Image (tube, rainbow, N blue to C red):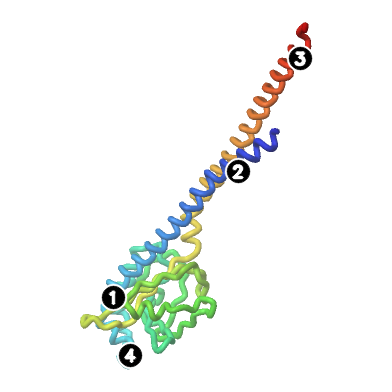
Amino acid sequence: MFAIASLAAAAILVSIVAIPQWLSREARWDALRSHVAEIGQLAASVVDGDLHRQLLDPTNYSAESYARALGPLVRFHSANPNIFYLYTMVDRGGTVYFVLDTAASPDLRTNHQLRASGYMERFDLRKEYEDDWLTQIGAGKTYVTPNFEQDDYGYFLTAHAPIYDSDGRYSGFVGVDFDLQYYLAQEARFRAIAIGSLVTALILALLIGFLVTIYDSSIRDSLTAVSFTHLTLPA
């Protein structure tokens, strides 16, 4: 009886705890992706679209124009320490190239160890992650990777937001990377709460099983006593 009662109570209590925890985790994940998308949009808004459009043509490149275009992004990145990488890109017929990268600036303030991408360095997306991301960005949408994805720089949840010049022409896009450790750090405290809740549920299940066993035993004793009384009464 103890085992049956404990298992039944555990199944109910664990479900009561686990289902809301799972729903909460999904909600936090959606909130994180929305937050990353907002950061991407804000980063795109600080880029000088006209200057960035000029830099899409390598013949217009100069160290001075590169630094001038990069400056606002460096300040934005420095003010948001949770950002890992912040950069801009251009799509050339399905082939993507880096344009600006804050990791290249000596003025960037960050605690992360970064590896800068060069101007017009090619970016190759791994085949397992291929989808219509470039089409979505070109259509004016902010694209967030479905999950953390691995590239040559690490595991990142990434937002891409389009950049426009003063005439409203699509002029490349921003990329904002948040690494896996950022997510794990946020989830750590919730994981501790979840584990504590499950342990409490299991302890309660054992207690319920114990109480049910005692109650069942007392009922059996009472029934036995009643039966014995009836048997010993004179006819």
Residue under pointer 3: 228
Going from the N terminus, do you reach mark 3 or mark 4 first? Answer: 4
| Image coords of residue 158 (percent x, y) | 43, 70
Residue under pointer 4: 57
Do callouts 2 and 3 mark residues in contact (Cβ within 8 Å)?
no
Q: Is residue 61 above or below residue 234?
A: below
Horizontally, residue 60 falls left or right of residue 220, namely left
Question: Which is more toward the observer, 162 or 188?
Answer: 162
Distance between mark 3 and mark 4 Cα atoms: 101 Å
Q: Is residue 216 above or below residue 222?
A: below
SS for dot 4: loop
Distance between mark 4 and mark 1 Cα atoms: 17 Å
Q: Amino acid at mark 1?
A: Val
Question: Which is more toward the observer, 100 or 123?
Answer: 123
Label 4 CA crowd tier, 10 Å (few <14, some 14–19, many 20+): few
Q: Residue at x 35, y 78 (%)?
A: 173
To which quarter of the image does residue 159 belong? bottom left
Disc marking residue 11: 2
Do callouts 3 and 4 mark residues in contact (Cβ within 8 Å)?
no
Which-is-in-front pick, marks 2 and 3?
3
Q: Amino acid at mark 4?
A: Asp
Label 2 CA crowd tier, 10 Å (few <14, some 14–19, many 20+): some
Residue under pointer 1: 47
| Image coords of residue 71 (percent x, y) | 30, 74
Going from the N terminus, do you reach mark 2 or mark 3 first? Answer: 2
Q: Residue at x 34, y 81 (%)?
A: 172
Distance between mark 1 and mark 3 Cα atoms: 91 Å
Distance between mark 2 and mark 3 Cα atoms: 38 Å
State how many labels appear.
4
Q: Amino acid at mark 2?
A: Ala
Distance between mark 1 and mark 2 Cα atoms: 54 Å
| Image coords of residue 148 (percent x, y) | 49, 67
